Amino acid sequence: ENPSGRKGKLEDIREHVEKAEALREKLWFSEEEKEAWKLDGEDTLKSIVKEADDWFDEYAIYLEGDNRRNEARSCISLSKLKQIVYEANCIHANIGPSCSKITRILGQAESWYEKH
């Protein structure tokens, strides 16, 4: 657990996972022993990276490019936006500009909805 409550950057977490894998390859253990050898917290970091990658894969259509110029993406429901932001916030990493972008879009949509 992170006592400060701050989320690490996804790219930093990904780098730590890659370093752990590189370190494992340098061990003089047998392949079976290498496979069993894990750094403390490595599985947690791997699961965070996988969770973020899955989120990006699932919602790529809403996250990439300019949503204002794409008819297929411009008609997303408020509940879908809430779901995307909720799932992003559940990931224990700072996933960067994509999360900020979709959170801002949700805020704008909620504001528009309240006015109309």
Image (cartoon, helix red, strand yellow):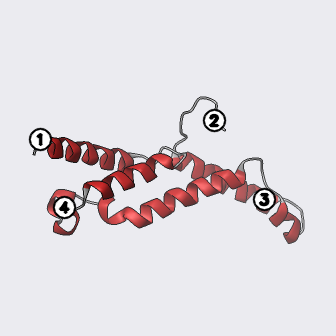
How crowded is the residue under tag 4: few (<14 C-alpha within 10 Å), some, or many (20+)?
Answer: few
Mark 1 vs mark 3, CA separation in Å: 57 Å
Mark 1 vs mark 2, CA separation in Å: 39 Å
Q: Position of residue 73 (x, y in %)?
A: 23, 64
Residue corresponding to mark 4: 74
Judge by depth and name the residue closer to the eye, 98 or 51.
51
Q: In what quadrant of the picture does the N terminus appear? A: top right
* Residue drawn at 89 percent across, 62 percent down: 28
Residue 2 placement: quadrant: top right
Helix, strand or loop at mark 4: helix
Labels in figure, total: 4
**Mark 1 or 2, closer to the camera:** 1
Residue corresponding to mark 3: 24
**Mark 1 or 3, closer to the camera:** 1
Helix, strand or loop at mark 3: helix
Residue corresponding to mark 2: 2
Left or right, residue 76 beside residue 51: left
Disc number for residue 115: 1
**Mark 4 or 1, closer to the camera:** 1
Mark 3 vs mark 4, CA separation in Å: 46 Å
Q: Are marks 1 and 2 in contact (CB under 8 Å)?
A: no
Q: Earlier in the sequence, mark 3 or mark 4?
A: 3
How crowded is the residue under tag 2: few (<14 C-alpha within 10 Å), some, or many (20+)?
Answer: few
Mark 3 vs mark 2, CA separation in Å: 25 Å
